[in-house]
């Protein structure tokens, strides 16, 4: 199943991680070409004029996988992978976005916009490790997608992407129950 980009994971870093969809079940790379990356950046609200080639694509994927490795380890209560932390630290240090108010819009400005986006995403991933955030970090029990649980009770088990994970789980449980009742 092809999926278009979704922005339902609850943070820029998590949304970026989600550009490999259904990591835990049936992974699909959604950012195959530099153009895909441009499209994602635009939809994610980064509206600068980026020059994106294969090198930028590779850097973006490196940051994305580092963020995934680190946050997945955090969800699993495992030691954080050193290489992932290193990558996020390096990129995050280059953050130089400056908010500017222009024609009523707040725009993030930088002389190195592409590097700044990766810095922004790296910083977002690192900040997700703060204790008040990380306790709300979840992995969807259906598709494996990482998401930030913003619900008030904080007991969400499924992502809210259009893959309909919560629904699928409920349908399966319903069928299970029927089957067990039938056998009784
Ligand atoms: Zn899911």
Image: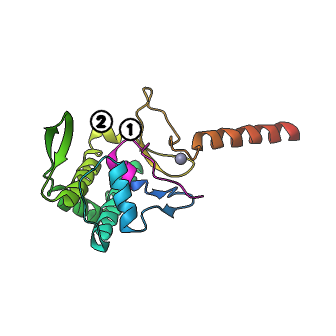
Q: Does the magenta stretch include residue 184?
A: no
Label 2 environment density (alpha carbons within 10 Å; few <14, some 14–19, many ≥20)? few
Residue, far bottom: 54
Q: In which quarter of the image is the N terminus?
A: bottom right
Q: Position of residue 136 (x, y in %)?
A: 38, 38
**Residue beneath disc 2:** 132
Mark 1 lies on a secondary structure that is loop
Residue 170 in which image quadrant: top right
Rendering coords of residue 141 (x, y %): 54, 46
66 or 82, which is in the foreground? 66
Q: Within 8 Å: ligand 1 and the Cβ of disc 2?
A: no
Residue 74 seen in the figure: no
Element class at badge 2: helix
| Residue 168 numbered mark, or none | none
Q: Is the magenta stretch mostly helix, strand or loop?
A: loop
Magenta region: 1-16
| Residue at mark 1 | 136
């Amino acid at each position: 199943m092809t999926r278009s980009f979704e922005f339902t994971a609850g943070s820029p870093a998590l949304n970026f991680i989600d550009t490999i969809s259904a990591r835990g079940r049936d992974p699909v790379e959604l950012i195959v070409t530099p153009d895909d990356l441009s499209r994602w950046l635009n939809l994610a609200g980064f509206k600068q004029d980026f020059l994106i080639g294969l090198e930028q694509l590779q850097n973006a994927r490196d940051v994305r996988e580092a963020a995934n490795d680190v946050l997945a380890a955090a969800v699993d209560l495992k030691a954080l992978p050193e290489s992932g932390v290193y990558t996020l630290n390096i990129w995050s240090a280059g953050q130089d976005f400056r908010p500017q108010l222009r024609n009523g819009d707040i725009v993030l400005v930088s002389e190195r916009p592409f590097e700044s986006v990766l810095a922004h995403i790296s910083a977002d991933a690192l900040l997700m490790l703060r204790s008040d955030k990380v306790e709300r970090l979840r992995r969807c029990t259906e598709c494996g997608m990482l998401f930030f649980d913003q619900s008030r009770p904080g007991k969400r088990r499924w992502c809210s992407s259009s893959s309909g994970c919560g629904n699928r789980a409920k349908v399966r449980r319903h069928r299970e129950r029927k089957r067990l009742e039938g056998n009784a």
